[in-house]
Amino acid sequence: MGTMWYGGKIYTMRLQEETVEAVFTENGKIIDVGEESFLKDKYKERIDTYKNLNKGVMYPGFVDSHLHIIGHGEKLLNLDLSKITSSKDLIISLQERARDLEEGEWLIGEGWNENQWENPRILHRDELDAIFPDNPVLLNRVCRHAAIVNSKALEIADIEDSTKDPQGGKIVKDRKGKPTGYLLDQAQELVKKKVPYMTQKKLESIINTAIKDLLRLGLVGGHSEDLFYYGGFAKTLHAYQAVVPVNFKFRAHLLVHHAVMEEVKEAGLTYGDGGAFTQLGAMKIFSDGALGGRTAWLKEPYADDPSNYGLPIHHKDQLEGLIKKARKNNMPVAVHAIGDQAIEMIADLLLKYPLSNNRRDRIIHAQIMNKTLLRKLKQLNAVLDIQPSFVASDFPWVIERLGKSRVKQSYPWKTYLDEGIPIAAGSDAPIEEVNPLLGIEAAVLRKSNLDSEIYNEEQQLSVYEAIHLYTTGSAYVINHEYDRGQISPGFVADFTILDQDLFEVEKNKIHEASVLMTVVDEEIMYQK
């Protein structure tokens, strides 16, 4: 027996601004759409539940194509530094937290961003030592490609004056050759691998907290990369499966970090396994860092650091070996690549080793672009996994990093669509706010959160294009374009229901819409 959804405006996302009056669902699937009276009469013997939308506006369920679900949960539960606006306030926040720490307990802080401070600078380990002489401290930068640690954490990680930089990372040192506590990319891992793993129960609690919040924000699913960092593949996957769909129905598509591929094989699993709610995805690889810490790998040097081109995480032969390993296991890859040099190297390797099945690779971020590289991307069977909110948070400081001429070609979301390059969109939470309405608004406006100016206006997307990225776009990247991302017969009954019509509200007020209901597999997982 099924459910009739009616009493509001329903956007199918099959065609631009196409609406229907009602939807009939059964056993988690959409059976039919059309006029309310017609459907009620046609399926009257099968309808056992009527859901009046009460003038709400229904869309296909929004899905975040790139986030870190456990990281989002950690941000909700740990020390959140993302709203700090000065180094002074950061130190005050740390001093307040210091009073609650037990002897030897690690302090983990999330999301500091010196670019939003009045006087940008990087804290020195001495400043942390003054507050935490005996507790190890790890403060993750907003991009998670840099961190500040204190002397206790350096000691635990065996980082000394003589310690050499790891491949793809940098231990920042002062003029005397002493570590400052500032670690870039792979150098962070020297400390992070020393942080005690959380218990299984704690891990499940964090996932539970995160998914509850995602559902509250209208997300029916997310493509996440967590399976390497919290005690191993099996432990983390089992934690997901203990929450989803036991506590909540939520479509968690889980990328597989290349370092746990052997564990996945030993478990007899591969791409697509896990069921409808904890499905394994592509093999995740990092090819470079981020712009904030000047570790994104560029073809030309940073405008504000002419000796620096960024950091490749892997040598080319290592990266090629990882892609060959994925192909041997018939898996697509999902590669983090921000700088144009990193993107070009990935594009060349994907052209050299194309997929032999109908699955799709993805290049995550793809921010720094040029015309030659665009031509290569058009030849790939790959989706660009973009983060619209990066425009809102990176401008105007990114102009200092890249220079005006280069930044004009960068973050080119509209160009990708015009060139026929498929894209999907996510938040990269906890790096950005996870709310999909903020992402949709950022794609439409391209307005900076820092100075309220609009940047690269010609790259603004229409509301339809922006919503498309979180519905049909996120379905396409994982080969679910035929059963997810639209309100159409045969598709899953996943819906995001808002109190406002995003096609009619002022574009700068999209984020003010409220989620009335989040529906997954025909079941209401959140209701305001």
Image (cartoon, rainbow, N blue to C red):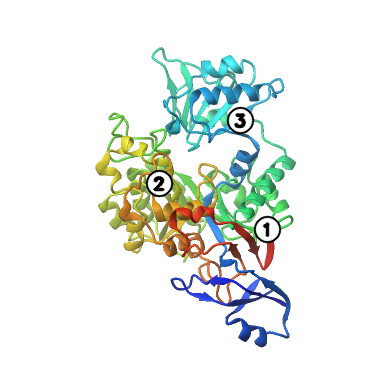
Q: Which residue is mark 2?
A: 391
Tag 2 secondary structure: helix
| Placement of 45 over or under 515, stated as above or below | below
Looking at the image, do the residues carrying marks 3 and 1 touch, with CB atoms under 8 Å apart?
no
Tag 3 secondary structure: strand
Question: How packed is label 2: few (under 14 Cα within 10 Å), some, or many (20 or more)?
Answer: many
In the image, 269: left or right of 246? left
Label of residue 526 in the image:
1
Tag 1 secondary structure: strand
Q: Quadrant of residue 306?
A: top left
Q: Which residue is mark 3?
A: 108
- The extreme top residue here reads 176
Q: Quadrant of the C terminus?
A: bottom right
Give me the C-alpha separation between circle 3 and circle 1: 30 Å
Question: How packed is label 3: few (under 14 Cα within 10 Å), some, or many (20 or more)?
Answer: some
The amino acid pointed to by label 2 is Val
Whichever of callouts 2 and 1 sits on the residue coming sooner in the sequence is 2
Residue under the point 50% across and 57% down: 331
Residue under the point 52% across and 21% down: 159
The amino acid pointed to by label 3 is Ile
